[in-house]
Image: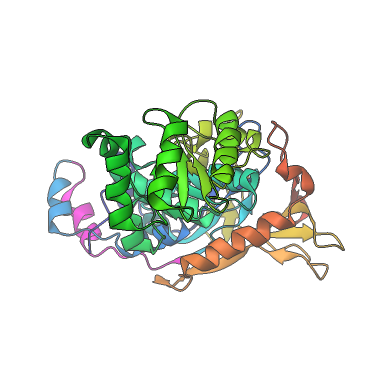
Amino acid sequence: MTSTALLTDHYELTMLQAALERGTAHRRSVFELFPRRLPEGRRYGVVAGVGRALDAIEDFTFDDEALATLEDVVNDETREWLASYHFSGDVWGYAEGEAYFPYSPLLIVEGTFAEAVLLETLLLSIYNHDSAIASAASRMTMAAGDRPCIEMGSRRTHEQAAVASARAAYVAGFASTSNLAARQRYGVPSAGTSAHSFTLLHDSEADAFQAQVTSLGSGTTLLVDTYDVGEAVRAGVEIAGTELGAVRLDSGDLGVLAHRVRTQLDDLGATKTRIVVTSDLDEYAIAALAAAPVDGYGVGTQLVTGSGHPTCGFVYKLVAREGDDGAMVSVAKKSVDKISIGGRKFALRRLDGQGVAEAEVVGIGTAPENDGNDRPLLVELVRDGEVVGREPLLDARARHTAVRSELPWSVQQMSKGEPVIPTIHLEEHLEG
């Protein structure tokens, strides 16, 4: 086990120390992780990182090395309290792969203030990153339709963020990744063949193709734009035969090239050879290639940077806490443009008679009334400090496919717009 306890901010621990000294640290508290808005122009978001967050909560303990680091941060009494820290509260949240909208209560953390506040930075770090990647990936796979997308952004981000990105992309429909650590840790299928350096290593392009086909078989994918694309395609089919698996285009006008290469492959009898395109693709480029004879997309930079939105803007706020009389009271931040809504939340996705989503309905203090076919959104993740909501990654992937198909048709539009469904708070459920 590698402790996650120091993946936090200094002020979480100074708040803890002051609360311990004041006698308020052990007040029962409810924290909520939520977005105030969607990234500009986005019509929906995708929840990802839930499984990683559960692992991180389990590993959030202060070992001797961590405590030694804190000698000049907090006092001895606080370090003594931290030495026995283990989250013992409850966590409810949206399941991984679920869609979200403004003010969706994505995570509800219940425990003492001391226990729950320490998780703030870590949970925000995981959710903001992974959900940004999954949200971009979902738009890309939606634009791609039945054509597979391959995640290949490892060299464009931090080495550990690359692994998390591959996982989040897989949740949102990507077929595979180039990252082998994601294969090892999470079972994400991996794929890849060669780069331009492999071609340049050999005395000729034909020599490089021959070496690759001899080693990997005729079903391999040949990179054909190191020199002349037409000559490379001809050489590839000549060496691998008409059963050549695929060719990859990584530069130029991909739409025009794809048409030319498709015609050439068909003329050479390689009618089953696929065409895969790469080169700074995003959801807009993928959508623009819908009419081109492309069989798959490799996506890197734009995916791992959230396609212009590298974070979701999630926040983690105290929304209820124990009062002096022992009863729970709602609390909320009222700053201009940064308001929060007090009270413990419950949420459901309101569906019409055809099963199409109409609204995100959030009840405060009490669950909204379900008219029979609505979907409750919060699932139990942690009970009394023990993880109970862990699930296979394939379940999250299947959930996302089902959830996205439930949203109104306008979700398919790549142009900027408002959220496809409104968020409705049932104020009559407000607690005192």
Residue 234 screen position, x and y as percent: 45, 39
Rendered-image quadrant of the C terminus: bottom right
Give the quarter of the figure containing the N terminus.
Answer: bottom left
Q: How many marks?
A: 0
Q: Can residue 402 be seen at all in this image of the molecule?
A: yes
Residue 317 to residue 414: above or below: below
- Indicate the colouring scheme: rainbow
In terms of image quadrants, where is residue 356?
bottom right
Q: Decide if residue 37 is in sight here.
A: no
- Residue at horizontal 52%, vertical 30%? 308
Residue 108 belongs to the span the image colors magenta: no
Pick the residue in front: 156 or 223: 223
- Between 65 and 419, the one nearer to me in the picture: 419
- Based on the displayed image, in which of its 4 quarters is residue 387 positioned? bottom left
* Residue 300 image point, x, y percent: 43, 39
Question: In the image, what residue occupies the spot 47% across and 49% down?
Answer: 246
Residue at 45% over, 52% down: 244
**Residue 164: x, y in percent?**
39, 50
For the point 43% across and 66% down, the residue is 89
Q: Residue furthest right?
A: 353
Give the left or right position of residue 297, taking residue 415 as reference: left
In the rendered image, residue 86 lying in the magenta stretch gets the answer yes
> Which stretch is magenta?
73-90
- Location of residue 38 with respect to 241 vertically, above or below: above
> Front-most of 262 and 235?
235
**Front-lying residue, 262 or 330:** 262
Q: Residue furthest top?
A: 252
Residue 175 at x, y = what percent? Answer: 50, 56
